[in-house]
Each structure stands twice: as structure tokens, then as C-alpha cells.
Image (cartoon, grey):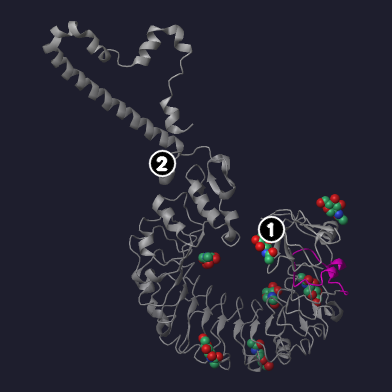
Amino acid sequence: MSWPSPSSMLSLFLILTVPLANAVVYECPAECECDLMPPNNASWAVFCHRGGINDTKFAEILNRLPTTLRMLEIEAPSWRPRNKFKWNDNLNRFSQLRVLRLIGSGILAISRSIRLPSLEILDLRHNKIEHATMSNFGGMPALRFLDLSSNKLSILPTGVFTYLRSLRSLSLARNNITDMSTNLLRGLGTLRALHLDGNPIPIKHINDVFSDVLQLEDLYLNQCNLTAIANLSLDRIPHLRSLGLARNDLHAVPTAELHLLHRLSFLDLSGNQIREIGPCAFCSNNLTSLDLSHNLLGLDKDAFHADAFRNIPLYELDLSYNHLDNFESTNLGWAMDSIRILALSGNYIQGFPMQLTEKLTALTHLHMAYNDIEDIPLIFPPEYINLRFLNISGNRLSHLPDNMGRMLPKLKEFDLSFNRFTSFSYSALSFINYLERVYLQGNPWDCSCAIQNLQAHMRDRYALRHQLKYNEARCAEPKLFEGQPVLAVIEVNDCAVLFGARYGLTQSSELLILLGALLSAALALTMLLLCFYCVREKQYKGTYVTREHSSAASEPLSPANPMLESISYHPIHSGTLPSPPKPAAAYFGI
Ligand SMILES: *[C@@H]1O[C@H](CO)[C@@H](O)[C@H](O)[C@H]1NC(C)=O
Ligand SMILES: *[C@@H]1O[C@H](CO)[C@@H](O)[C@H](O)[C@H]1NC(C)=O
Ligand SMILES: *[C@@H]1O[C@H](CO)[C@@H](O)[C@H](O)[C@H]1NC(C)=O
Ligand SMILES: *[C@@H]1O[C@H](CO)[C@@H](O)[C@H](O)[C@H]1NC(C)=O
Ligand SMILES: *[C@@H]1O[C@H](CO)[C@@H](O)[C@H](O)[C@H]1NC(C)=O
Ligand SMILES: *[C@@H]1O[C@H](CO)[C@@H](O)[C@H](O)[C@H]1NC(C)=O
Ligand SMILES: *[C@@H]1O[C@H](CO)[C@@H](O)[C@H](O)[C@H]1NC(C)=O
């Protein structure tokens, strides 16, 4: 079945109609946004994010969509009415469907008669699924990614995933799994990533699972109440590249336990009780990215051993929320030359001291959010000249200095959300206009006139509005617009019309300035005329005698304004004359 390609591009929320050969008309459902997909626009990607979808509406939506549907995503943001529906076997119509996300929709069970031969991604996070059996997954042989996190699964029968021969990533995180049957993952020779976070699974069962998937590369055991991992048989999965051990109860870096993982490149130890990083803590690994946020590294004086980061190609390090009040770049020791991304958010650093970044020559990304910073200094430390990303979110800043562009010449991304900015100066605005991504949410924006320039900045980046959370950049003033998204404010009455917008002036202040200018101009003119008359007076005294004889020649001098004369001398005609133009109106363009 071939599709005529639609003539005009759909914009968001546009209702789209595509005539089919047999005259069936498919319409983008009112609850959704529909995108045409390359290469030939014949298939659709459909996003339904408005909430309030029940069984009836779900069935209606499915009926409206063409069989060439490629992607369907249904999820309600927290401030919209919730979705609540059951699985609908009409989904089987979409034999070309590759991506199906039915998130937080109150689904109680997966159908046993699914036939979705092209499905690669199935995302059923945050539902209420209690059971899963082999027959649920028999009809999707191409599935590569299965997310069943945050459901109510407790016991998974042996062989439940047997048919998923292409599966690469499986998430069973945040369920209620206390018991994993042996051989649960037997035969899943392609599985690379396994998420078991937040389940009360005994370590013995986790070890049993490892035996089935020796090829595992990514393992997540975050929030599993682990006090130690000595009994975890990580030696069975030597190919591990990523390991998540966040939000457990570890009191030290498990150096010995990790020593067989020579390929380990990403390690998440955030949210534990770690107070120090000992010598050669990761020497046997190949760490490039290390998350140590939300630990206790600021409590001890010498938390970082001089050899702590020896022998690893570390380039990303997160030390946020560690009670640090004075961090020195020399703490990084061996990693000083390689660190590109450094996060120090949520500490008590209160500024941008030199020793923080000294000699970090590779640094390009710096997070300094939530550090109680009140001012941006007139000069940043020299390393900032290479920064491409700077995060100063959650501080107490209200002003950007005029020389930001010179201090941060390579900056592309800037997070200044959750500060106290109300508006930007002209120079601050030209600085942020030059950047690619600027996060503005959580500031008390003043949405009177000057906001138009900020709106223009945001409209230029409209395609990034979800990432940049434009919905959460809201007005605090004036009262009329309080709480409204900055981009939603269209009726800004109080607007400067001439030059004021460039300098962030409102209409009233602009009018005041103009009035002042007019008054002083008038004053100057009066003075000038007075002087002029004084001079003439002196001259006339000398020529007074001749004036009587040449009255015709001197006549134009006497009525200063012929129009005024005609009005005062011929009041009857004044109505028919065009009224004199109001200078104010002409100036202000009213
Ligand atoms: C797809 O749609 C867009 C917008 O309507 C159009 O510009 C483009 O040419 C279309 N592509 C094809 C291959 O029809
Ligand atoms: C679904 O919601 C619509 C209104 O949004 C309502 O008219 C309809 O009765 C509901 N259907 C069910 C099965 O609850
Ligand atoms: C978790 O599963 C156990 C039985 O395995 C059950 O007793 C308990 O109520 C479940 N907890 C939740 C939160 O569903
Ligand atoms: C972890 O332990 C706490 C308290 O001991 C308990 O409430 C929680 O359910 C446990 N979580 C897991 C995943 O075992
Ligand atoms: C590890 O296993 C041994 C015996 O199998 C046990 O005595 C010890 O308590 C276990 N350690 C942890 C942290 O679970
Ligand atoms: C270590 O990581 C580098 C890339 O950072 C990679 O080229 C190298 O092969 C890795 N070594 C091992 C043993 O995995
Ligand atoms: C900035 O840092 C805060 C706090 O760590 C974080 O929540 C936020 O996501 C960061 N911003 C960006 C753009 O990464």
C-alpha cells in the first residue's frame, strides 16, 4: 500500500489527514501529537502526553492511527489527569510498530496474544503489572529493549523471557522481586544490560542469574540495601563495563571486589557512606566515569589519597553533595590532566576560587550548582576560557556581568535555572543569544515589557523546549502574569516602542525619558529664540526709522506661526482645517 506524501509539514498539535487509496481517513487523535517520519513521511510517530486516557479513548486512538504506525508513546506528565487503561489487542494491527511506550497508564497485565513482529522497544514503566509469563512475550521476536521497571512483579517463572532471542537490555528495577528462579535468563545470549535496582533480591539469587548471562556488560544494583559486595560473584561477568551500586549502604570503595573487572569504565557509587578514596582505588579498572556524589568525602580532612586516581583514564568525576567547603584541584592527583567533566554541585564552595580548577587543562564542563554563590566575579580563573558547559543553577545570582562573553568565549550550554534573575541587561542578553542551550526555569522572571527579548531567545530554540524546560520558566511579575510560562505571555501591553526594548526599559519609563527630552528641547528652543529676539531688538533699534517705509518686506517676520494666526483670527474656519498633528502621537507610534 503506497501513501501519497502529505503536502504540508505538520506543526505541533496540527490535525493531520492522510487520504488512503481506499478513502479511509486517518487523523491525528486530539490527545496526541503526530510526526511524519523520514525517509518518505509514510509512517507516523505518535506522542500522547495530555493524560486522561481511559479504555474508550485508548481504543479510539488506536482506531485513528494508520497501520504504518512506527512509534507510539503514551505518558501523562504529573500535572495532567492520569491515564488508566487496559492492554488492547487492536495494537496487533500495527505490524510495523518499532517503539511502544505505555508509561504510567495503570496497566494490570500484558496480553497473551501480542503479535508485534517489528517491535524493538517495549517500555511499560510505572504500571501495575503483577505477573508475567512466557506467553506474554511470544509475539515480539525482534524485541531488543524491555523496560518493566516500577511495576508490581514479585515472582518471575523460569523461562519467562525465553522467546526474546534478540533482547539486549532488560529492566526489572523497582518491582517487588524477592526471588529469582534459577535459569531465569537462560538462553538470552544477546543480553548486555540488566537493571535490578530497588528489589529485595538476596545476593545468592543475583549470583545465580549471572551464570546465565556471562556476557553481561551493564549491571545496575542501585538501591538494593547492599552493605558490602564481597559475596557478589562479579568474577562471573568479567566483561562488565558499567556498574551501578548507588544508594546502597557501602562504607568504602570496594576496591578488592572490583579488581577482576579490567574493562569497567563507568562506576556509580553515589548515595553511599564513603568518606575516603584510598591509594590505587581503581587501579585494576579502566574507569572513565566515576560518580561519587552524595557521599561523605568532605567530612574527613584528607579524603583523597595522592594515588587515589592512579592509572585510570578518568575524564568525568562527580563529587556533588559531599559536604565539601574547600576543594582543591590537586586532590585529583593523577586525574588532573584527564578530567574534562567535573561536578561540585551541592557543596559549600560559595564562589569560583582559583584552586578549584587550577591546572585542570582538559576541563570543559563544570557543575557549580547549589553552592550558595551570590555573585559572578569580574574575572573567572583562567581555565574557564575552555569551558563549553557551566552549571550555576540553584544559587543566589541575579546579575550577569557585561564581560561574560570574554570570560567564557567557548561556552555552548549554560544552566542558570533556580536563581534570582528577573531580567537580563542588553549585554547579558546578547551573551546568552550566542549560546546554544540556556536553562532559564525557576527564576522569578519579570514579564513586563523587557521579557520580549527573552521570549525571542526562547522562540529561536523552540525545538529544544522540552530539554530546556521552557514550560517551567515562569513569570513572577507583574501580578497579572504570575505563574504563567514566559513563552505563554503574549499580551505585554507595557511595552517600550522605540529604543527602550534594547535596554530593557518599559513603556512608561521610555515615555518619561521622551517627555524629559522634549521638555529640555523646548526649553533650549525658548532660550535660543529669546537670545535671537534680544539680538534682533538691538538691530531694530538702529533701523526703526526705515521700517514704516518697507512694511511689506518685514511682514513675514511678525506672525510667528501662520496656522496659529489663522485659528485665532478666523475661528469660523478652524473646524474645516485639518487639526494640527499631535507630536506625541507621531513620536510614540500610538
Ligand atoms: C516530508 O514532509 C515534509 C513536510 O511536509 C516535506 O518537506 C518533505 O519533502 C516530505 N518528504 C518526503 C520524502 O515526502
Ligand atoms: C472515558 O472518558 C470519557 C470522557 O473523557 C467518558 O465519556 C467515558 O465514559 C469514559 N469511558 C470509560 C470506559 O470510563
Ligand atoms: C511484595 O511481595 C510480597 C510477597 O512476595 C507481598 O507479601 C508484599 O505485599 C509485596 N509488597 C508490595 C509492596 O507489593
Ligand atoms: C531496604 O531496607 C529498608 C529498611 O531496612 C526496607 O524498608 C526496604 O524495603 C529495603 N529495600 C530493599 C530493596 O531491600
Ligand atoms: C557473605 O557470605 C558469608 C558466608 O557465605 C557470610 O558469613 C557473610 O555474612 C556474607 N557477607 C555479607 C556481607 O553478606
Ligand atoms: C580502556 O578504555 C579505553 C577507552 O577509554 C579503550 O580503548 C581500551 O580498550 C579499554 N581497555 C580495556 C582493557 O578494556
Ligand atoms: C545542574 O546541576 C544540578 C544539580 O546537580 C542538576 O540537577 C542539573 O541537572 C544540572 N544541569 C544540567 C543542565 O545538567
CA separation, marks 2 and 1?
A: 42 Å
- Of discs 2 and 1, which sits in the foreground? 2
Question: Disc 2 residue type?
Answer: Phe
Seen at 40% across and 83% down, the residue is 333
Which quarter of the rendering shows the N terminus? bottom right
Residue 435: x percent and y percent? 46, 61
Residue 32: x percent and y percent? 74, 57
Mark 2 Cα shell of 10 Å, populated few (<14), some (14-19), many (≥20):
few
Q: Is residue 423 above or below residue 364?
A: above
Q: Is residue 469 above or below residue 451?
A: below
Residue 255, image quadrant: bottom right
Residue 430, image quadrant: bottom left
- Side of 426 where 291 appears, left or right: right
Q: Is 89 a magenta residue?
A: yes
Seen at 42% across and 33% down, the residue is 511
Which residue sits furthest right? 113
Question: Disc 1 residue type?
Answer: Ser
**Which residue is more in the foreground, 127 or 101?**
101
Q: Earlier in the sequence, mark 2 or mark 1?
A: 1
From which residue to which does the magenta span run? Answer: 87-113
Q: Which residue is mark 2?
A: 499
> Which dot marks residue 78?
1
- Side of 213 where 437 appears, left or right: left
Residue 286 visible (yes or no): no
Q: Is 173 a magenta residue?
A: no
Residue 334: x percent and y percent? 41, 85
What SS does tag 1 mark?
Answer: loop
Q: Is residue 225 above or below residue 187?
A: above
Q: How many marks?
A: 2
Mark 1 Cα shell of 10 Å, populated few (<14), some (14-19), many (≥20):
few
